[in-house]
Image (tube, rainbow, N blue to C red):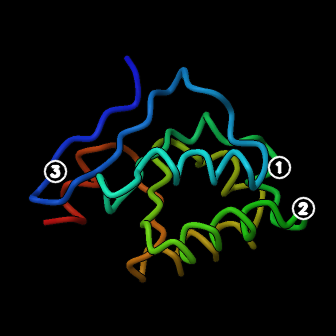
């Protein structure tokens, strides 16, 4: 499967392939943002695509990547089980909780949960 734009609950979403290139830095995030060019409002990225540093908040990688999506007004959705990372970090747990209260960055277990959030 490749990255594909699909409509979910009336919202164009770029659903990224789990076998795509890793997102290990800001330029990788910008490449994903560029792939949405006027085609999608939301990008759903499998959690496994993110470099492990993304989930270690002290590295700053998550903040940098999330800020790029905010700057370009593209909603970022991290899709998948990150329970091990959340269990290991109170800061990450707090980030996930706060992000999911907002509308710009969400952490969801699967695409069905994304559909529920979009509905």
Image: 48 above or below 96: above
Mark 2: few, some, or many residues within 10 Å (few <14, many ≥20)?
few
Q: Nearer the viewer, residue 80 or 4?
A: 4
Residue corresponding to mark 1: 53
Residue 11 position in % (x across, y down): 18, 59
Residue 62 position in % (x across, y down): 72, 62
Q: Give the mark nearer the N terminus: 3 vs 1.
A: 3
Q: Give the mark nearer the N terminus: 2 vs 3.
A: 3
Secondary structure at badge 2 equals: helix
Q: Separation of disc 2 and disc 3 at Cα?
A: 33 Å
Quarter of the image with the C terminus in it:
bottom left
Secondary structure at badge 1 equals: helix
Secondary structure at badge 3 equals: strand
Residue at 15% across, 48% down: 7
Image: 21 above or below 104: above
Residue corresponding to mark 2: 59
Residue corresponding to mark 3: 8
Q: Residue furthest top?
A: 1
Residue at 49% across, 44% down: 45
Residue 44 position in % (x across, y down): 41, 48
Name the quadrant containing residue 12: bottom left
């Amino acid at each position: 499967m490749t990255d594909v734009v699909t409509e979910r609950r009336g919202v164009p979403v770029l659903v990224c392939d789990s076998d795509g290139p890793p997102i290990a830095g800001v330029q990788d995030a910008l490449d994903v943002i560029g792939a949405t060019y006027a085609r999608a409002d939301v990008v759903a990225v499998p959690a496994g695509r993110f470099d492990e540093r993304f989930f270690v908040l002290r590295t700053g990688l998550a903040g940098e990547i999330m800020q790029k999506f905010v700057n370009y007004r593209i909603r970022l959705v991290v899709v998948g089980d990150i329970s091990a990372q959340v269990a290991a970090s109170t800061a990450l747990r707090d980030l996930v909780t706060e992000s999911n209260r907002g509308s710009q960055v969400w952490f969801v277990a699967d695409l069905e949960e994304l559909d529920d959030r979009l509905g």
